[in-house]
Image (cartoon, coloured by chain):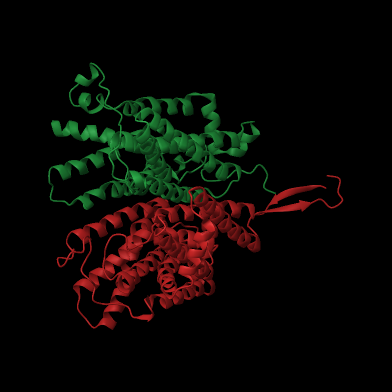
């Protein structure tokens, strides 16, 4: 029982990083822009949060600073991909390198030092008394509630229950038709690509302020890329993206438990689980529904720049 | 003056080349500006880098040593680009090739000349094996190869770490996280530069020839440009995808083997200086031209050596990663600009 609670608790904590980053990617890809810079943005957010909280020991300020950095880099990414309309894959790879490079350079003085502050757990009265789920979910830090309850609901509502969300999806599916209907394609893409990047940086801040309270080079360890893959697995749905993040938290948690219980599998082999798991999660469904319209879940104009007139 | 911009479906080669050069210059200028703000003297740093990298025998040898893996990983990315595919996993295939070569070198005895050939093919085979799952998934289920190849990089790193600290670790005098020295070594032909460099150059010409002059290369290009048409014309697109991806994996694997047999001589974490990731930029800047790789690999070998020199100045290698990202970003923007041309209306009334 205690092990189960422990696994679930770690799963929520570890999954939060992936869920938040994946949500950002869902927003960005729904308006038609694939952001492969997630890995770099997560790293930037992580290092910003640690660096800021070293001088201002307040996790909220650290988190806000990371969001700000994410927004700034997101705006640059949106300028390159939406305004200039440069190749989205190249820009994404470039942002991964820029982000990881800057984060490692800036973060060197803080490397390995325990973070000054973390988000403290907020125990929800009554709900935390529920067996297993109570201690596992309702005694987490405030960001966990936000990521698993508020944000997916909000993003889902925005995308599927509002007029504006319909416009967003139209921009991602068929920008020419959206343009003809008077929807400002570039503006919508610009705004939501920037916001998506902000989410990714927030995921990084979550990593260093709530999950692993310290920075070291390589701490992001491909989480940004896993988040990109989860969006494909989640077929661009905010709820499924968050749940997929949780599933990955679960895999990570099983690895931790394995280490703690001295399973006869060495740590590096257990460490491969999240990557191998991600790969099988995007390959296996593609094979099962090979002949059905599995891939049509992707927004039709994903990855394509929109030109009003190609003459 | 009436003028408007026209976007061309593909960039003019001269404009594309100019855009690449301008992008590199802009990225380096921006980096120099940042260095100046951080309190370095960019001109003094540049002078130091130039004199140490290009002005000393030691620097030139280092440069030659870095060239080999960069040419090969760049080639590995390019061969897949010809088919419109992205190989972001050259890093992992590089490590896989190193693991395969190390396994042969550590556990099989034989005459050195034969063993080196066996290691070469072992490295190529391991690299190809490493890309097998993404390749099959791409060919038979249309799974995007970008993410699957990339995620396997992390697995390969963990595998090398596991072998170096676990079953294959050096039980002798204290090297941590590394296998024993592999007894079979590539000969050097100039200082510390081994025969891997001529092999890499020869492979570049070989791949360029295969892609340009053979039926296979033609079918690969057609399948990349328009898979439906290629299928309709009777080209076995799936088999071409598999062959291209296995070849890419094998080339990266060979890069890993040469690094093991020629430079490092032990399997350990960090033997790849981000060569796999740099291969992407090498390929992109070369405009997917095989022979162009020789030039762009040279550029990045220089940047990497500069990074080593600058470490003595307190700059980290991570700064080099950020700089390469900046070059890639500016290049992506430049390539878009290179597609436009200005049209002047000739005495017209529009």
Looking at the picture, how far across and down is residue B310, in whole percent? 43, 59
Which of these two is toward me, A202 or A179? A202
Residue B83 seen in render: no
Q: How many marks?
A: 0
Looking at the picture, how far across and down is residue A298, in whole percent? 46, 41
Instruction: Please identify the quarter of the rendering in which residue B243 is found.
Output: bottom left
**Chain B appears in which tint?**
red
User: Is B195 placed above or below A17 here?
Assistant: below
Residue shown at 33% from the left, 38% from the top: A207
Which of these two is toward me, B68 or B288? B68
Query: Is B61 on the left-hand or right-hand side of A303?
Result: left
Which of these two is toward me, A41 or A175? A41
Looking at the picture, how far across and down is residue A262, in whole percent? 12, 46
Query: Is A287 on the left-hand or right-hand side of A129?
Result: right
Which of these two is toward me, B84 or A110? A110
Looking at the picture, how far across and down is residue A154, in whole percent? 43, 25
Residue A176 seen in render: yes
**Chain A appears in which tint?**
green
């Amino acid at each position: 029982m205690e092990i189960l609670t422990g696994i679930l608790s770690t799963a929520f904590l570890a999954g939060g990083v992936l869920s938040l980053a994946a949500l950002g990617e869902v927003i960005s890809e729904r308006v038609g822009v694939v952001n492969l810079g997630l890995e770099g943005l997560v790293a930037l957010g992580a290092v910003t949060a640690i660096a800021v909280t070293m001088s201002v020991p307040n996790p909220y300020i650290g988190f806000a600073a990371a969001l700000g950095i994410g927004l700034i880099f997101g705006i640059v990414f949106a300028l390159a991909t939406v305004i200039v309309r440069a190749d989205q894959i190249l820009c994404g790879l470039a942002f991964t390198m820029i982000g990881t490079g800057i984060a490692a350079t800036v973060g060197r003085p803080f490397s390995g030092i325990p973070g000054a502050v973390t988000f403290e757990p907020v125990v929800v009265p009554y709900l935390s008394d529920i067996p297993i789920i109570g201690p596992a979910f309702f005694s987490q830090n405030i960001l966990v509630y936000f990521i698993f309850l508020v944000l997916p609901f909000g993003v889902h509502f925005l995308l599927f229950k509002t007029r504006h969300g319909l416009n967003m999806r139209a921009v991602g599916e068929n920008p020419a038709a959206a343009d003809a209907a008077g929807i400002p394609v570039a503006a919508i893409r610009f705004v939501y690509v920037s916001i998506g990047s902000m989410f990714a940086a927030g995921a990084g801040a979550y990593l260093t302020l709530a999950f692993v309270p310290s920075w070291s080079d390589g701490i992001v360890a491909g989480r940004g890329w896993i988040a990109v893959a989860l969006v494909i697995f989640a077929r661009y749905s905010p709820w499924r993206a968050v749940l997929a993040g949780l599933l990955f938290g679960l895999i990570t948690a099983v690895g931790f438990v394995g280490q703690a219980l001295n399973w006869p599998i060495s740590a590096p082999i257990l460490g491969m689980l999240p990557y191998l798991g991600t790969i099988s999660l995007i390959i296996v469904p593609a094979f099962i529904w090979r002949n059905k319209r599995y891939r049509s879940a992707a927004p039709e104009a994903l990855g394509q720049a929109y030109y009003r007139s190609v003459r | 003056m009436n003028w408007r911009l026209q976007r061309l479906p593909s960039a003019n080669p001269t404009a594309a080349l100019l855009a690449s050069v301008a992008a590199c210059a802009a990225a380096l200028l921006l980096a120099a500006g940042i260095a100046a703000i951080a309190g370095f003297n960019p001109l003094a740093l540049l002078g130091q880098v130039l004199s140490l990298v290009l002005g000393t025998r030691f620097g030139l040898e280092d440069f030659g040593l870095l060239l080999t893996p960069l040419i090969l990983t760049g080639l590995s990315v390019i061969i897949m680009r010809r088919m419109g595919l992205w190989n972001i996993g050259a890093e992992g295939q590089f490590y896989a090739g190193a693991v395969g070569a190390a396994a042969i070198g550590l556990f099989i005895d034989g005459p050195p000349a034969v063993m080196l050939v066996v290691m070469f093919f072992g490295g190529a085979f391991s690299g190809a094996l490493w890309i097998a799952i993404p390749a099959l998934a791409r060919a038979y289920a249309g799974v995007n190869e970008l993410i699957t190849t990339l995620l396997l990089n992390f697995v390969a790193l963990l595998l090398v770490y596991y072998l170096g600290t676990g079953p294959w670790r050096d039980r002798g005098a204290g090297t941590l996280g590394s296998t024993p020295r592999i007894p079979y070594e590539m000969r050097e032909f100039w200082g510390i530069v081994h025969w891997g460099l001529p092999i890499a150059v020869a492979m570049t010409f070989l791949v360029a020839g295969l892609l340009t002059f053979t039926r296979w290369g033609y079918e690969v290009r057609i399948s990349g440009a328009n898979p439906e048409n290629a299928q309709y014309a009777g080209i076995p697109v799936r088999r071409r995808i598999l062959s291209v991806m296995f070849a890419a994996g094998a080339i990266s694997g060979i890069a890993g083997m040469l690094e093991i047999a020629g430079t490092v001589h032990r399997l350990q974490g960090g033997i790849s200086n981000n060569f796999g990731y740099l291969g992407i930029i090498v390929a992109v800047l070369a405009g997917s031209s095989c022979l162009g790789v020789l030039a762009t690999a040279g550029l990045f070998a220089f940047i990497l050596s500069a990074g080593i020199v600058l470490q003595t100045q307190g700059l980290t290698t991570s700064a080099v990663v950020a700089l390469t990202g900046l070059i890639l970003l500016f290049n992506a923007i430049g390539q878009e600009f290179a597609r436009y041309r200005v049209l002047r209306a000739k005495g017209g009334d529009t």
